[in-house]
Image (spheres, helix red, strand yellow):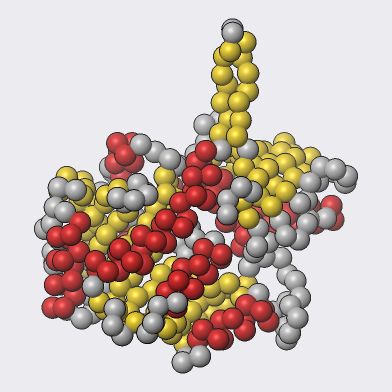
Amino acid sequence: MGTDRRIDATTLDDLLLTSRERMVDDRNRNFRVICLTSELSWEEFLKRCQGWFTIEEQGDFHELHATYQKHNKEFDVYLYLFKHPVTGSPTFLTLNSHDGFHRTADRMITKTEGIYNMWFPPDSMTTLKDRILGEEGSRLVAFEGEKFGREQKYEEERRPGTPREGEYRAPDTAETLEERKKEYGITPTHLYFEWPTKGDFHFRDEGEFVLTRGDPQFFFNEIVTPGLEDIEPLNTAFKESNLNIVTRQGVQQIEKETLEIELTTPLEYEEADDLIGQMKSEGFYPYSYQAAEGSLLLNGRIVDESNGGMISLSTDGEVLSILPRYESGFDSLLRFYRFVVEQVDADASVKGVS
């Protein structure tokens, strides 16, 4: 088993420098940053990683090691976990491939309550894109996208109702992306950039940033960190949503902080069954719910079948109010918001988060 992706560094600066040297030696090697969000304490987060990885403390990092089998060969994966110095979010640095990360860490992330990918909704992807393209010499060279939200007609759409997704790569990528957003409602989920004086890189809406050429220190400080800073208010809002029983002067009272998702196109009563069907197809199972025409369209509880979490939901068709139940993690709320954006309303926003 090769160990060439192991990094013997104890500080962030040393790890970034070593990664640069490895990339110069092997131009096929990429530097990867995978960002997560979690409401767990750092100690509890590390405990959740046990059983999935062998963990060793290494200066400012924890080295996570695992192996996987592919084509009858065994491969090593080395991930370097630390708290992001600005946002405090769990962050993995690695020279391993996307496939290596997927085969070892993805199951831990999707199956563990209280942990989720640092998901970037469409407006955050646009903010990141526009910031990079605002720098002289940078250019967007490719994108992957999907059509989010309920089926709706766009001003210039041809063949409405046709599923649209895939990759586009050409000199006019930036212009084409804007055209497809307008004509078809395409939302970018993966953006590729070239910046001759800085480097080549791409990032996904699931919090994975990949440098294929250039300086990892520039990449981490000037691309990854500003992106995390932009998304932090949204993640904080999800973490602050809670339901607690408190005792005041001997009397138990309910104390709650509800999260409100505002829709740009209201749901009608006739769409309630479709909404419930979409929830089920995405792993959210509604039970003990009521649908009624009038001031309250839908009210009930939803089980997140991916990790057993539970949330309560009520909506009048314009605002969806959600709240974690029975000490469920915030990740179920975040995953539900992602479902709303991708399946119901691509422009849905969390109230109070700019």
Residue situated furthest bottom in the rendering: 171
Q: Quadrant of residue 250?
A: top right
Report if residue 245 is visible in the image.
yes
Q: Quadrant of residue 19?
A: bottom left
Report if residue 302 is visible in the image.
no
Q: Is residue 295 left or right of residue 262?
A: right
Number of labels in the image equals 0
Query: Going 63% across and 38% down the picture, which residue do you hit?
Result: 258
Query: Going 37% across and 56% down the picture, which residue do you hit?
Result: 35
Residue situated furthest right in the rendering: 294
Residue 184, given in percent of the width and then of the height, sits at: 67, 79
Say if 323 sits above or below 187 in the image.
above
Q: Is residue 51 left or right of residue 318?
A: left
Query: Going 16% across and 78% down the picture, which residue do you hit?
Result: 24
Residue 37, given in percent of the width and then of the height, sits at: 42, 49
Q: Is residue 249 left or right of residue 107?
A: right
Say if 310 sits above or below 166 in the image.
above
Residue 69, given in percent of the width and then of the height, sits at: 26, 63
Query: Going 72% across and 60% down the picture, which residue do you hit?
Result: 264
Residue situated furthest top in the rendering: 250
Say if 7 sits above or below 326 in the image.
below
Residue 39, given in percent of the width and then of the height, sits at: 43, 40
Which image quarter is the C terminus in? bottom right
Q: Is residue 319 left or right of residue 233?
A: right
Which image quarter is the N terminus in? bottom left
